[in-house]
Each structure stands twice: as structure tokens, then as C-alpha cells.
Image (cartoon, rainbow, N blue to C red):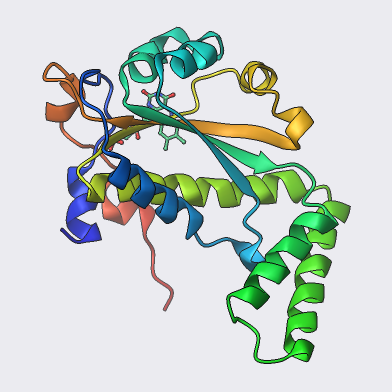
Amino acid sequence: MDLFELSSQRFTTKHYDPSRKIPDSDIEKLKEILRLTPSAVNSQPWHFIIGSSDKAKQLIRPAVVDFNWPRTDGCSHFVVLCVKDGLDEAHLDAVTAQEDADGRFPNETIKNEGDSKRKRYVSMKRDRGQLRSWATHQVYIAMAALLYGAASLGIQSTAIEGYNPSKLDEILGLREKGLRSVAIVTLGYGSLDDGNATRKKSRLPADAIFSELD
Ligand SMILES: Cc1cc2nc3c(=O)[nH]c(=O)nc-3n(C[C@H](O)[C@H](O)[C@H](O)COP(=O)(O)O)c2cc1C
């Protein structure tokens, strides 16, 4: 199924069948989809925390708004999408070292130029007080990749902003790790009584959201 067809078929799951678990092989594919997400200046300002056990679900529950408990309790897996705080020198050096190891640079000059360009760009965002919000935008791209990647594997999902970020960050000790949560995505297979599966999709019409320049 191509992305065009997936776009019209995927939907947000509200109730999962807790007895159905996503196979490890599909979880590995979803992790790779997340890892391969594009980001501005290849900054990759993210970290993903995956949970699937009852213990993990109970751990995050106090931070999740109660209307979302059917998703976090019943899902097979959940992913807490986090943004890296500050994007320090060590992170940017690690990105450049990885690009080097992956053979992205034909020579040292181009490598050094790429490295300083990225560092300048990040500094500019920091100086303007935009670093966190800019980095968070990149994490939302990963979220979209995860939602559509899951659908492409026949896995249903829910993007969840309905939780208390500071509480979740505290429960998971994220600040100490230089991270902040951005959103949760639950993954699994919808239960037979998931009303959303048969609910009509609704979006504003094309003429309300597109315009063309002469
Ligand atoms: C960033 C984001 C946050 C969302 N937060 C929640 C949420 O907390 N709980 C929930 O049940 N659905 C949540 N949704 C699902 C939206 O309500 C849903 O995508 C929208 O109504 C369109 O429906 P569809 O995904 O079935 O096409 C969220 C979606 C996005 C993209």
C-alpha cells in the first residue's frame, strides 16, 4: 500500500486489544524508521523510550490524562518521544563522527565545513531562544514517521499529547538525562469495539487549505 492509500486508511485507535502483541521484528522496523527520520541539519535531537510491560504501563499511568488510559493500558507498546535539552557540543560532535563513519564526507575540509555549519546553526537557534522549540519540531517529524510507519506494517497507533509532561519527565527522570518528553505514541491492534475504526474520517476540504501562486 502506498502512502496515499495509507493516508486515507490510517486512523487513531482509541481502544486496543490487550491480548495482541506486536512482534519483535516489527518493533525493530519501527525503531529503524524512527532512527532514519530526517531532521534539520541532521541534528537528530531526540531520544525514544519504549515500554511494553505492565510495569512500564503502570509507571507512566499517573502522568497520563485519564481519558487516555484505555490507550496506554491496552496498547502492546508505547513510545515516549523526547527532545534533547540544549544540543551540547558532545551531541553535535557525535553526529559529525557518525556522518564521517557512514562515509558522508569525501574529505576532511567538507567534514569540517559541515560540522561548523551545523554548530553555527544550532548556536543561532540558541541565541534567539528558539532551540527547544526548533528541536521539538524535529521530534514531531519522527512522530509522523512512526504513525505512518506503523500503519504501513498493519499496526494501529495513537498520538498522545493528553498527558502531564512535567510529571512524566519526573517519573522517568528525564531532566537528569538531559531530556524532555514531547509526546507519547501508543501502538498495537485495535479491539473489536474500537468505535474509531468505523468513524468517518474528516478533514477540511482541499480548497480551504491550499492556494496557488500565479
Ligand atoms: C500531536 C497529536 C496529539 C494527539 N493527542 C491525542 C490524545 O491525547 N488522545 C487521543 O485519543 N488522540 C490524540 N490525537 C489524535 C487526534 O485526535 C486525531 O489524529 C484526529 O482527530 C484525526 O483523526 P484520525 O487520526 O483518526 O484521522 C492526537 C493527534 C496528534 C497528531
Ligand 1 is found in the corner quadrant, namely top left
Q: Nearer the viewer, residue 211 or 202?
A: 202
Q: Nearer the viewer, residue 201 or 68?
A: 68
User: In this picture, is 212 found above or below 171?
Assistant: below
User: In this picture, is 169 found above or below 79?
Assistant: above
Q: Nearer the viewer, residue 51 or 65?
A: 51
Q: Is residue 48 left or right of residue 208?
A: right
* Residue 83 appears in view: yes
Where residue 127 appears, as percent x and y from the top left, is 88, 54
Work out which residue is located at the far right of the displayed protein and give it.
127
Where residue 147 appears, as percent x and y from the top left, is 35, 43
Q: Quadrant of residue 121?
A: bottom right
Q: Nearer the viewer, residue 68 or 97?
A: 97
Where residue 179 appears, as percent x and y from the top left, is 70, 36
Q: Quadrant of residue 185?
A: top left
Q: Is residue 114 left or right of residue 47?
A: right
Quarter of the figure that contains the N terminus = bottom left
Q: Is residue 22 left or right of residue 98?
A: left
User: In this picture, is 28 found above or below 73?
Assistant: below
User: In this picture, is 115 found above or below 176?
Assistant: below
Numbered label tally = 0
Quarter of the figure that contains the C terminus = bottom left
Q: Residue at x 71, y 70 (%)?
A: 97
* Residue 64 appears in view: no
Where residue 95 appears, as percent x and y from the top left, is 69, 64
